[in-house]
Image (spheres, helix red, strand yellow):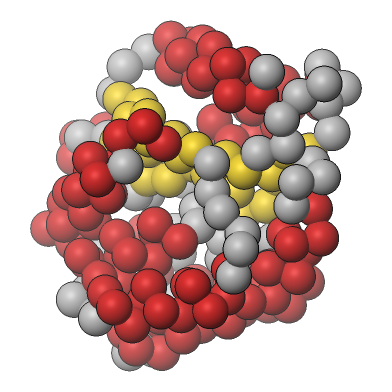
Amino acid sequence: MYKKIVIVFEGIESSGKTFHSHYVSKYLKKKKIDHILLREPGGSRNSEKIRKLLFNDKSYFNKKTDLLLYMASRSENMIRLKEYYKKKIILIDRFTDSTIAYQHYGQGLNLNLINDINKYLLEKFKVDFTFLNVVNKKNMIKRLKKRKRLNRYDKFDNNFYKKVQNGFIKIAKKTKKKYQIIDSNLDIDLNKKIIIEKINKLIK
């Protein structure tokens, strides 16, 4: 038997979080271990509709509207997440810490407000472990240039991404036992090995 835990992959743009979340999902599928993988924003029909609004280049929402749209997307996802909580391994590409890092540390919105809304939405749902992928400015820019399409969150200035990543690191330092920082500037195969080794320990 394996533990039905919640594992989140966090990080700024081009940090490798999406790649590693999908890699872990493929690994678990190969091992025939029951799990679900979803992303935020997105992850369910209504959440994906909100994602299109948030990332559309023609969208010009103020930062408070952005926050509320992210929370609305999460509210839709929580229906599915609570259904599988403690029944399957749950992998999430971005979650509550992204809201804190981007909307509080990046955009200066009230942290208590963000925490209060998250508590209201999550209720008893808890994250067991988080992989925080960090990347330097040079590699982030290099990887973004390779993307065929960029959304509006791929186009902020470097100072914004620096504030967000530093915010993530501050969050990680507060909960060391439930966080592992992955240096995405290192060899990708090395990081895959590190993450899978940790996954195996977490679910046993």
Which of the pair 47/124 is nearer the observer? 124
- The spot of residue 6 in percent (x, y) is 62, 43
Which of the pair 52/195 is nearer the observer? 195
The residue shown at (45%, 61%) is 96
Identify whether 32 is placed above or below 95: above
Indicate the quadrant containing the N terminus: top left, top right, bottom left or bottom right: top right
**Which quadrant would residue 25 be assigned to in this image?**
top right
**Which quadrant would residue 40 be assigned to in this image?**
bottom right
Q: How many labels does the image show?
A: 0
- The spot of residue 97 in percent (x, y) is 39, 57
Left or right placement of residue 85 versus residue 5 in this view? right
Indicate the quadrant containing the C terminus: top left, top right, bottom left or bottom right: top right
The residue shown at (39%, 66%) is 99
Q: Visible in this render: residue 45? A: yes
Identify whether 130 is placed above or below 197: below
Q: Residue furthest front?
A: 124
**Which quadrant would residue 48 be assigned to in this image?**
bottom right
Q: Visible in this render: residue 155? A: no
The residue shown at (61%, 63%) is 124
The residue shown at (30%, 25%) is 183
- The spot of residue 187 in percent (x, y) is 37, 13
Identify whether 64 is placed above or below 176: below
Which of the pair 189/157 is nearer the observer? 189
